[in-house]
Image (tube, rainbow, N blue to C red):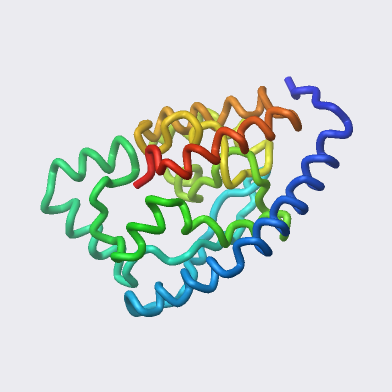
Amino acid sequence: MKKKTNSFYPFFKRLFDILFSLSFIVIFSPIYIAIALLIKLDSKGPIFYIGKRLGKNGSHITIYKFRTMYVDAEKRLEEMLKNNPIMEEEWNVYQKLQEDPRCTSIGKFLRKTSLDEFPQFFNVLKGDLSVVGPRPHYIYELEGKEKSPLKKYAHLILSVKPGITGLWQISGRSHLSYEDRVELDSLYYKKQSFFYDLYVVLKTIPMVLASRGAV
């Protein structure tokens, strides 16, 4: 059954997305420049990471982040998981690693502080992301043959535009298992409203400042 929402909600949500993102980019523009310089000085490779993710209704969108990994990141991960059963188990549960061999020195700091997410506000202006919503999932999570928690909740998660922050970011972040994160993402479909979005934004600020649950 389709959830009924206030008819003005989409308009105010989009207006908030545009105004919030523009203000954020202008205010923090010096930090954007500083991060770009640090990335170039720290390791070889581009400043930005550009990747494909699932958008609303299962569309494929391009997202932008500051690069936090070495250019041979996937090779490093494959070798690490092959030779370290403990890390392989951690990856299977969380889809993340506390000590990720792929991350550069500045990349670890950017992830810890969530500064790597700053370019995604351009995605919000473009209309692919919202400030608040389920996090954009990898395409393979839905299209792969293996069983994935996303497939169970895809009809809810993909019915709304993905966001920079959402329920799992204010509920434990990387300390949650992958399955728990997906389940929390699905709850946004039922809870979404303009005032609930404001609540999530306000809850996100102290989480990010304290770097709680970030890796």
* Total numbered circles: 0
Residue 174 x/y as whole percent: 38, 38
Residue 105 x/y as whole percent: 29, 65
The one nearer the camera, 90 or 106, is: 106
The one nearer the camera, 145 or 192, is: 192
Residue 142 x/y as whole percent: 50, 43
Is residue 67 depicted above or below 6 in this figure?
Answer: below
In-image side of 133 versus 209 (left or right) = right
Residue 166 x/y as whole percent: 57, 36
Q: Name the residue: 47% across, 58% down.
A: 116
Q: Residue reaching furthest right?
A: 7
Q: Is residue 101 visible?
A: yes
Q: Name the residue: 34% across, 65% down.
A: 106
Quarter of the image where the N terminus is located: top right
In-image side of 125 versus 164 (left or right) = right
Is residue 49 depicted above or below 152 in this figure?
Answer: below
Instruction: Indicate the quadrant where residue 156 lies.
Output: top right
Q: Is residue 146 visible?
A: no
Instruction: Indicate the quadrant where residue 127 lies.
Output: bottom right
